[in-house]
Image (cartoon, helix red, strand yellow):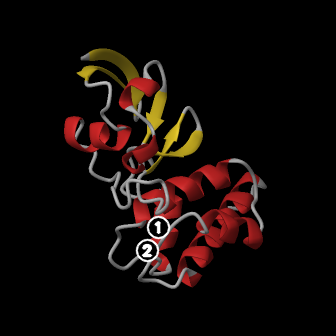
Amino acid sequence: MTGITLTVNGRIVVEEVEPRLLLSDFLRHRLGLTGTHVGCEHGVCGACTVRLDGVSVRACCVLAVQVDGSTVETVESLAGDALLSPLQKAFKRHHALQCGFCTPGILIAADDLLSRGDPSREEIVDMLSGHLCRCTGYAPIVAAIEEARDNSSQASEGGG
């Protein structure tokens, strides 16, 4: 067993883990953060996407011991004290989820993309190319992310 200390969704976590434990399994099974979904376990589907030290990563491709001293944000962190974040509200308005399996990973990746500026439609589509969704056809997801981008831009300009 190896001791790790990290910050998860603003909370300091100190745990003993097996060196081979995946970050996705650590988050789900040890911390109960089940919003991090496990799909392919090869980093292809994007369902396990979390933010690690401010960068979107696939939690199924990272060992828990590798995040010692790091900060991890999961989908559970998006809303803070609110019921839903503006991005989550846009997903709801646009019906940008159906079964919801891919949604947490897409929300984290979209939030990360939006935090870096005002992405173009092409940049949004490019980001989504790393996430598998079998239900929505992606059009409502793109529309929701564009709405969140536009609302964020208006708010920062004093218009919203």
Residue 48 horizontal/vertical position (percent): 41, 53
Residue 159 horizontal/vertical position (percent): 74, 61
Residue at horizontal 55 percent and vertical 80 percent from the top: 138
Nearest the eye: 133 or 151: 133
Nearest the eye: 2 or 134: 2
Which amino acid type is shown beneath numbered disc 2? Lys
Classify 10 Å Cα crowding around label 1: few (below 14), some (14-19), many (20 and above): some
Q: Secondary structure at mark 2?
A: helix
Quarter of the image where the C terminus is located: bottom right
Task: Name the side, left or right, on which 15 lies relative to 42.
Answer: left
Residue at horizontal 50 percent and vertical 53 percent from the top: 108
Nearest the eye: 20 or 99: 20
Classify 10 Å Cα crowding around label 2: few (below 14), some (14-19), many (20 and above): some
Q: Would you say the residues marked 2 and 1 are in contact, meaning their CB atoms lie under 8 Å apart?
A: yes
Total marks drawn? Answer: 2
Nearest the eye: 152 or 16: 16
Q: Secondary structure at mark 1?
A: helix
Which amino acid type is shown beneath numbered disc 1? Lys
* Residue, disc 2: 92
Residue 8 horizontal/vertical position (percent): 39, 32
The residue most toward the top is 3
Res. 77 image quadrant = top left
Residue 67 circle label: none
Task: Name the side, left or right, on which 91 lies relative to 119.
Answer: left
Residue at horizontal 34 percent and vertical 44 percent from the top: 24
* Residue, disc 1: 89
Q: Label 2 to label 1, Cα distance in Å? A: 5 Å
79 relative to 73, above or below:
below
